[in-house]
Structures are given as C-alpha cells and as structure tokens.
Image: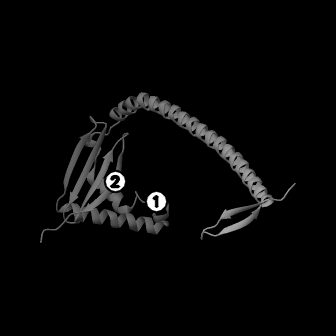
Amino acid sequence: MANTTSFAPSVNGSSQRRSSSSVRSSSSTTSSTASTNQTIDTISNELLIQYGLMAIGALLIFKLIFTALNMIILFALPVIYLYASANCPSNDTFDAKKELKRVMRGAHLPEEHQPKGFFEKGLNKLTASITTELATSLGYEIRINDYFGAAAKMASVKVPVAGYEYYWIGIFDRWRYMGQKEIPTNT
C-alpha cells in the first residue's frame, strides 16, 4: 500500500501534512465510536420504553385501587351516617360539671401523664372537684349545637371565672373532650 500525503488546512491558514494511514485510523475510530453510541442509544431507548410501560401499568393499578375504594366509601358512608344518627347522645346526657371534673382531673391525657399512685389520684380528684365547684358556682354557659342532621353534636361550656371555654363532641353514644380556648379579656 502506498503511503500518500495530503494537505489539510489548519486553523491559522497554513497547511499541514497528514499521511493516509492516520486518516484511515481516525475514520475507524469514528465508526467504532458511532456504533458504540448507536448501541447505547438502542439500550437506553429500550429501558425508557420499559420504564414507561411500567409507569403506565402502575397508574392503571392505582386507578383500579382508588375506584374500588370509592365504591366501598359510597356504600359505607350512608351506613356510618345512619349508625352515628342512631347512636348520637341526647342533650340531656351532657352533664357540664361532671365533664369539667374529668377534664380537670386529666382523664383526657395520655397514660404517661395520668396520676400514678393512690394518694396522687385522690388528691387530683379532690383538686378537680373543688376547682370545678368554685369555677361553676359563679356561673357558666352551655351551648349544644347539632351537626350533620343530628349525627354529631358539639357542646361548649364557657366558664368566665376560669377564663376558658371548653369543647366536647358527642358522637357514637359518648361525649369526647376536644379542647379548650382562652376567653379574651376586655381591657
């Protein structure tokens, strides 16, 4: 094979000598790089297609799950409403002093904050009874509102002497303590 010399222009305008063997090696490197890039592109396209199909499949599964849950909720919601309506406590069952004593005693607190010993429990009950009687002896206001067509009731007891308003919700045949709010004082 004859070694030929070609002239290739350079950046600054002067020509450089290059042999044909170096031209052949650079073209073979270019073709191997192109085939490698084509292989990588094919593999990445296949992965993209697989991931896309998996994402579509996951979306279809989620859609089926949520459709099934919606059907369950549509059938369960009226049953829950009827049960709550039938078991809603009446207004007569709300005893404000008794519920306030429970709150003052800490019956709504978690187990780790409950009084532990016999004397501590007794002292806590005594303190709650005295505090409730003193606070309510000067007057308190009870409001009971019906919600959801008498499926739930909200009771609030305003005790101006203590400076708090206490809230209970009556649902499923029981009064549950919800919280308290400080009454703003007018100065």
Which sits in the foreground, 82 or 78? 78
Which sits in the foreground, 136 or 62? 62
* Residue appearing at x 43%, y 27% in the figure: 75
Answer above or below: position of 92 versus 67: below
In which image quadrant can residue 136 be found? bottom left
Going by the numbered disc 1, the residue's amino acid type is Pro
Question: Which of the numbered marks, if any, corresponds to residue 49?
Answer: none
Pointer 2 with pointer 1, Cβ within 8 A: no
* Residue appearing at x 50%, y 34% in the figure: 63
Residue 44 in picture, x, y percent from top left: 65, 46
Direction from residue 52 to residue 180 in the image, left or right:
left
Local crowd at mark 2 within 10 Å, few (<14), some, or many (≥20)? few
Mark closest to the chain's N terminus, 2 or 1:
1
In which image quadrant can residue 54 be found? top right
* Residue appearing at x 62%, y 39% in the figure: 49
Residue 2 in picture, x, y percent from top left: 85, 56
* Residue appearing at x 35%, y 65% in the figure: 126
Answer above or below: position of 91 versus 68: below
Local crowd at mark 1 within 10 Å, few (<14), some, or many (≥20)? few
What residue is disc 1 on? 110
What residue is disc 2 on? 178
In which image quadrant can residue 4 be found? bottom right
